[in-house]
Image (cartoon, rainbow, N blue to C red):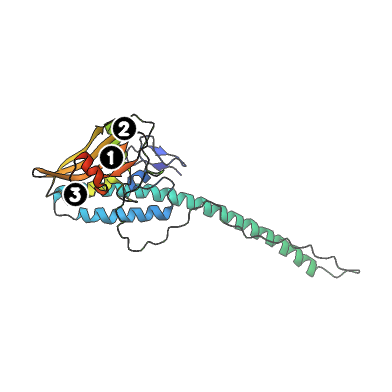
Amino acid sequence: MSWRCPECSRTNEPPQKKCACGYAYYEILGVKEDASPDSTEQTYRYLFNIWKKSADDQDRHARSKAAERLKKINDAHAVFLQMTRDSGKDAMTSSTLKFAAAGGVGLIIFVVIAFVLFSPVRKGPLPSAPEAVPMQQASPEKGAPSLPAQPGQLQPAPLQTRGPSSGDTPDMAAEKTSDWAIESVKKSHSLDRIVTVDALADKWLAENSGKLKPIGWAAKKIGDSIFLVSFTAADGTTSTGFYFDISTETGEIRNIANHPDLQQKYGIRIN
């Protein structure tokens, strides 16, 4: 079953999960491409609850930004549900056909036995009934996704710093520019194991929209193989925000807030 891209309205055919325009539901939700349906559903509910609270904010700018983000999250969830339902229907159809085939074999055996038992008596020994063929219950096809379990009350995941994993490792084949450094940090999970840095930074800015004036993302080359990346906002003359460094050689991303030695090295004061 095809699915329509919410960004460019292009129709895509499975198993393609990423549109030619670059749109992918799993990137909007901040999950891996091969994440399980249960994990994807829990992440969606987590993001929905966070941005729904921001959408109820009294500040009009914050409310508008949260509503826009909620629409993107809901559109991505709709694409995910369509793909999951289509896969589930295929598996169900295959299982139904297998059960029907097994039932047909059983019916034939029953008719043969009935014919032998109720046929007129003849001289000589009765022919023995054909040996029944054991029926084997068809099992669902491997790989068919199960329905996601009903999640309980979701709690925000603890903030943590970790090394790059296969899901958030930067594109090391790309040119190592300031834009590359910023995009790599934004798509990473250096602050949270579920939500991307970009989503958390947007939420933080929305929650403080009446107090802080956004400055935005910036990247500065430090030496030959390090970029210092920041997302900041100003409170009067004082700036605050998130700081990271990223290696152009290994792609490792570090949260400066968890490294006092790096704060001293780069001259950054984190409140």
| Residue 4 x, y percent position in the rendering | 38, 41
The reply to whether callout 1 and callout 2 are in contact (CB within 8 Å) is: no
Q: Could you tell me the amino acid type at mark 2?
A: Ser
50 relative to 168 in the view: left or right: left
CA distance separating discs 3 and 1 = 24 Å
Q: Which mark is residue 245?
A: 1
Dot 1: element? strand
Q: Residues within 10 Å of mark 3 (few under 14, many from 20)?
A: many
The residue that disc 3 covers is: 206
Residues at discs 3 and 1 in contact (Cβ within 8 Å): no
**As shown in the figure, which amino acid type bears the numbered disc 3?**
Ala
Residue lying furthest right in this view?
124
Q: Where residue 225 is drawn, which disc sits there?
A: 2
Task: Give the residue type at disc 1.
Answer: Asp
Instruction: Tell me if residue 150 comes above or below residue 72 in the rendering.
Output: below
Name the residue nearer the viewer: 8 or 189. Answer: 189
In the image, 22 versus 162, the foreground residue is 162
Which is in the foreground here, disc 3 or disc 2? 2
Taking 250 as reference, is 221 left or right? left
Q: Is residue 132 left or right of residue 4?
A: right
